[in-house]
Amino acid sequence: MDVGTFLFSALYQFGDAFAFLVLSACGLAVIFGMMGVINLAHGEFIMCGAYVTVSAAHAGVPLPLAILIGALVSALVGAVVEVLVIRHLYSRPLDTIVATWGLSLIGTQGTLILLGSTMAGVGTPFGSFQVGDYSYSVYRLVLFAAAVTVLAGLYALFNWTRFGVMARATIQVPHMAAALGVDTRLVYSLTFALGAGLAGLAGGLYAPTMTLVPTMGTTFIMEAFVTVVVGGADVFLGTAPAAAVLAVVKATMTSWYGQLFGQIGLLLAVIVVIRVLPRGISGFLLRERA
Amino acid sequence: MNALSRFFRRLEGPQTLGRGPAFWVGFVLVLAAACAYPQFSDGYTVGNTVYFFTWIFMALGLCLIWGYGGSLSFGQTAFFGIAGYSYGILTINFGAAYGFTFVALLLAVAIGALFAALLGYFLFFGRISGVFLGIVTLSVTLVLERFMAQTAGPEWRIGAARLNGFNGMSNMPPLTLPWPGGDIVLFPDVELYYVVLGLLVVVYLGLRILVNSPFGNILVAIRENPERAEMLGYDIRKYQLGTFVIGAALAGLSGVLYTSWGQYITPSSMGMTAAALPIVWVAVGGRSDLTTTLVGTVTVLAVFQALTIHGSQYALVAMGAMLVLTVLLAPSGLIFALARLIARPFSKRQPGDA
């Protein structure tokens, strides 16, 4: 293998890991960054997005549209969950984790009962291309592009829209925002729905690449947790750089020792990082400004 | 007599529900009933009760870490699994002669505790708290599960013990008491019941002494307000780490007892669902008190088993719903709320303490 193909292969694997980390974590990070709530049912929202996407694709909807439908349905479910459960627990953030864990149990087992232990998937689209002696899946590049688009979209949403301004006001000083006429309850609901929708989007995007089982959410949440912990509370200054750093760790470990050691590497990285930077990367970057 | 009353005074205090002669008479009655119970039942049912008992240690450990210490540890099953696997590896390699199974029990619990000390050092000395502590510990147990699940190949063996991947380890010897005139092998039956019941009483009373000691008071002070506790001169990291290790050791004890009970342990005992169950027991029972945790754990386990038998697949859905409803409607726990209700008429003489 010459240097060019080696570099390409390394870059490709980095991009793949980066996309996976960003997509699986951004929904969790939005909810955590805005509301201080860790949504342990995150994996189930991902699963929901994947199932809806695949069902829609089986019904004849073209895949990109099906993925959007999956994300929308997840967002809807998220909004319902927020109104029924999360809303009542804002004063007790630690209890929210426990409650969402209960929801996660219900989600996984409920899907198993209703839809059975597995569901026929859809094939990975776009085929593959050849560089050097190795062939690469085009879809992985699409996923990388999607991850970058999601980050850019979130940046635009929070910085350039009315919702973004209200949302940022609500995180900074909730009662002040409320006094200025922002409907903070609505903002919280929408933010939670946004996080759930992003989880659904991740599920929809990855649905063509994996087997659909009710426990598929657990394949994402470890990475999502780790990225959010390393990143800290800010989506842009935290999640994106954390995903970049962790992607290097994951890609390196995975290509040397396999998938599992990629995860173990991530876990060790996070334990070391929190010892050195307890407030995550965004806490470290924001120290100057705080 | 004086020594006895001093002992009793150590068991009571502001951190535990239940005090005075009435409570202890009740305690002795319950204990007597628990001792007499195997006489009125058959070996299978008694073995099943032992199965419930094995989990209580993990629940009590979680109650100490979460309820008293205020640290969310969602990865208790990691220590459960580590100790369970350690027990299997040790006993398969060294056999059960000369009471080695009990040495293996201690060693396995120590291994679990050591792992917790290492992990806890990074967490607490990095001043991780709140939600992050919960998700890091949960990640640890999930990774351990996946690690053990891929150890199916013959290259994954420690001595004579194959790790066996997703199918889990089996055929390790159960706990064996060395006894003149033939070892007593503690199969899930009446003998094991008494051993575990004895352990349970010791652990329960020990924890009551612990949480009512200065250590326990400081722990609660940290839960209520970490900054204040720190300003008062306590190194909260050491107290939190200590609690974490004790809780992990108890989870490890559960792991060993479970493994020896069924002569079987699998990676799924460290998975997401397994990790959620202790949270359900402790939250539903009432995490801020040892007694309510104990009662809650036994109750929820019994309900869960009944549900599993009658409605098999809906049991986990019911558990999840129970957890959500408890958090929404009775945040301090169902049994705890009930206990407070019962205790209210008796506590009028001592207003102000809870």
Image: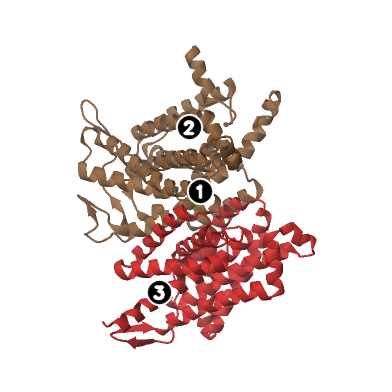
- In the picture of the structure, the residue carrying the numbered disc 2 is B207
Asked where in the image residue A2 lies, by quadrant, the reply is: bottom left
Kindly indicate whether the residue at mark 2 contacts the one at mark 1 (C-beta within 8 angstroms): no
Q: Nearer the viewer, mark 1 or mark 2?
A: 1
Indicate the chain on which mark 1 is placed.
B
Query: Badge 1, how many Cα within 10 Å: few under 14, some, many 20+?
Result: some
In the rendered image, is residue A27 in sight? no
Report the Cα–Cα distance between label 3 and label 2.
49 Å
- Number of the label disc, if any, that sits on residue A14: 3
Quarter containing the C terminus of chain B? top right
Residue B298 vs B178, above or below: the answer is below
Query: Badge 2, how many Cα within 10 Å: few under 14, some, many 20+?
Result: some
Point out residue B155 in the picture as x, y percentages from the top left corner: 22, 59
- In the picture of the structure, the residue carrying the numbered disc 1 is B127
Residue B23 vs B315, above or below: the answer is above
Indicate the chain on which mark 3 is placed.
A
Residue at (61% x, 42% y) in the render: B334
- Amino acid type of the residue that numbered disc 3 sits on in the rendered structure: Phe
Same subunit, labels 3 and 1: the answer reads no
- Amino acid type of the residue that numbered disc 1 sits on in the rendered structure: Arg
Q: Which chain is brown?
A: B
In the orientation shown, which residue stands out farthest toward the top?
B1
Residue at (30% x, 46% y) in the render: B86
Asked where in the image residue A107 lies, by quadrant, the reply is: bottom right
Q: Earlier in the sequence, mark 1 or mark 2?
A: 1
